[in-house]
Amino acid sequence: MSKGTFERILIWKSPRLKGIAKLNEFHIYAEGLKRCLEAPEDKKLRILDDLYGIGVPTASTILHFIYPNEFPIMDVRTAEVLFYSGYIESKKRDQKRYVPFLSAIMDIAHDYPKWSLRQIDKALFAYHKIALKRKLHKFLLQWSRAHSEVLPTCKSLCPHTSRSTIHSTSKGRMCS
C-alpha cells in the first residue's frame, strides 16, 4: 500500500488521525502492512492495531479496503446499533470485541447474501444517524430529568469541561 493510499484511508476514517499517525515515519507502517498481509487472518487486526496511532476501528478499515469481503469496518455507530439490537454484548471497539462484532456482521451478511459488507456497514451507519441517535438522546434526556437530583448541574462542570459525563443544565437540558 502506498503512503498516499494509507493517508487517504486515515483521512476517510477520521481526519484527526492524520495528525496522530507518524506519517513522516511511513516505513514503520509499511513494514506493519507487509507483516499484516503475510499473517494468518486471525493475526492481521492485531498487527495493525499495534502500530502507533492505529486503533481497531482504523485497523479494521484498512483491512476492509484490502479484504472487502472478509473484514467489516468497526465503527462507533455500527457497534452501537449492534449492541442496542442485541447482536453483541459490548459497544466497545477493541481487539477483544472485534471477533463478536465480525461474527454479528457475518450473520447479517449470511441472512442478506445480496448485500456486501460495505452495504451492511452503510445501512447500520444510516440507521444510527437517523433513528438510534435520536432514541438514545431522548432516553438520556428522560433519564436525566428523572434523576436530576443525582446529577451535577451544568454550572458546576461547565463551561464545557473535557469530562465525558452527561449532566443536566439548570434548565433541564442535556449537556455533555
Image (tube, rainbow, N blue to C red):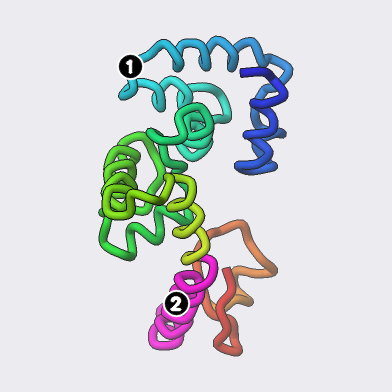
Closer to the chain start, of discs 2 and 1, is 1
Q: Nearer the viewer, residue 40 or 29?
A: 40
Looking at the rendered structure, the secondary structure element under dot 1 is loop
The circle drawn on residue 135 is 2
> Which residues fall within the magenta stretch?
129-150
Residue position for label 1: 40
Instruction: Mark 2: give few (<14), some (14-19) or many (20+) Cα within 10 Å.
Output: few
Residue 21: x %, y % from top left? 65, 28
Give me the C-alpha separation between circle 2 and circle 1: 40 Å
Is 172 located above or below residue 107 in the figure? below
Residue 133: within the magenta? yes
Q: Is residue 108 left or right of residue 137?
A: left
Total marks in image: 2
Looking at the rendered structure, the secondary structure element under dot 2 is helix
Residue in the image at 47% along x and 29% along y: 63
Q: Is residue 53 left or right of residue 136?
A: right
Is 149 located above or below residue 77 in the figure? below
Q: Nearer the viewer, residue 123 or 90?
A: 123
The kind of secondary structure the magenta stretch mainly shows is: helix
Image quadrant containing the N terminus: top right
Residue 113: x %, y % from top left? 33, 49
Residue in the image at 46% along x and 35% along y: 68
Residue 127: x %, y % from top left? 47, 66
Residue 144: within the magenta? yes
Residue in the image at 52% along x and 22% along y: 51
Is 43 located above or below residue 127 in the figure? above
Image quadrant containing the C terminus: bottom right
Direction front: furthest residue: 114
Instruction: Mark 1: give few (<14), some (14-19) or many (20+) Cα within 10 Å.
Output: few
